[in-house]
Image (tube, rainbow, N blue to C red):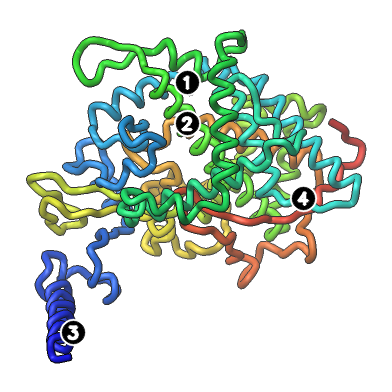
Amino acid sequence: MKLGATAERAGLGIIAGLCVYQIYFHRLHQHPGPLLAKLTNWYAAYYTPTAMVQIYSARANVRKDDAYPVMSASSHIPSTISCLDKGQHAAKRRILAQLFTPSALKGVEERVLSHIRTFCASLGESSQEGRATDMAVLSDYLTFDIISDLCYGQAFGLLQSTALRYIPNVISCISRRNAICFIQPAIQKYRLDRLFFAPISTQIHAFGRWIQQQQKQHPKKITPDFRSHLTTSTITHPGPNPRPLTNKEVWIELLQLVIAGSDTTTVALSAAVFHFCHHAAALARATAEVRTQFSTTVEAIRPGSPQLRRCTYLHACIHESLHLAPPVTGLAPRRVLEGGIQVDGVWLPAGIVLGCPIYAVQRDRTCFLTPDWHLPERQQQRQKRSRMLSAFCPFSVGHRACVARRFAMDEITVTLARVLFLYDLRLAGREDADAGTGAAAAAEYALKGWMTSGREGPVVYASPREGCSL
């Protein structure tokens, strides 16, 4: 008994000593923050635009944190997102960048538009049957069909068939799993993630079999796709001699594109519709703008068209939704290298993990007077206000920014423009709110902070516009 009591007191003493050290003597003890956070070994978080640049610029004396490898499908081969080595990341990124050049995007434009047409038709079918549409679900189907078609030359077919509609749930669980392992990598190390996500293991294996099937069938296909490009690409890191990507590297990069290229765009589309349906004045103005610019046919709404560029208010609404509901809300942790780094006037030594949560940066009250309100008009002034411009970073900043951001913006803009041209939107279950003051102006699209944002809804009715057809 005495031995047990002594051990208990010793344990409590050690815990108390660690708490005292963390609060009063840790090298970051002078930094403000929640008391409980000081008791952890978690990162230092900043939310200013200057910190964003200082931490994530190409010359910042930092590297990705050690937790990033949990995001790769292989424990031995990193993806572009998960690799820690700056040279290797740059080499892989250059290969992916070729997939999203203006000429490359022009070459896949018709394939993307074909899926957007199916998406718009699905909205109309639901309306004719008197059913409301969950935009988060339907947007998932659209973005997964587009990115799978571009990656493998064959779409999942989620918009037209129920066979593979379990895939968005699988990707959502992978996002949650990555977020958990990101915070505590030991969960992956000891394979506890397999236990936590055992209920969907069957679906994960089915998804893997579909991917393997596409790999085997690919040589028989003549449709150019991202896999064709990757299999003919060479990488020059490590070493100066170019070498082709291995089949495993191609598989990992394609899987990364499917996950990142679908989830983020879905969040942006769903959030934009949510804000439109909660702000009747903004919806009416954007709808009128689109229908004025495209008075004849919906087929004129294409990426880069002069009329679409003139839809300045629509663009402002999209940017405002990205401001209020960024597809990635959290921070991308960076580990300070030897020599330290200065952030917002404070010197931080090597070994510190730090970052900027995008959600917090974009709601910095020193940059936005009312950061929680839906005000598309301020996005039209953003180019004239440098501080507001610097605080807008939904696709991150620097050489780690999203390589497909132009493609994502084209996909979002064309889809929304076609929906507004064809349909009158309203929120299911309530009257449209007015974009005035109070609760309506501050309506919040609820997000969950996984690797990409978890979301639900909005559920809407899309009534076909009078005298207009697909």
Residue mark closest to the camera, 1 vs 3: 3
Q: Position of residue 366 (x, y in %)?
A: 36, 62
Label 4 or label 2, whichever comes before in sequence order: 4
Residue mark closest to the camera, 3 vs 4: 3
Q: Are marks 3 and 4 in contact (CB under 8 Å)?
A: no
Q: Which residue type does callout 3 highlight?
A: Glu
Dot 1 falls on a residue whose secondary structure is: helix
* Closest to the observer, 312 or 160: 160
Q: Are marks 1 and 4 in contact (CB under 8 Å)?
A: no
Quadrant of residue 3 within the rendered picture: bottom left
**Residue wearing tag 3:** 8
Q: Are marks 2 and 1 in contact (CB under 8 Å)?
A: yes
Q: How far apart are marks 1 and 4 (CA)?
A: 32 Å
**Residue wearing tag 4:** 133
Checking the image for residue 99, the label placed there is 1
Q: Distance between the residues labelled 4 and 2?
A: 28 Å
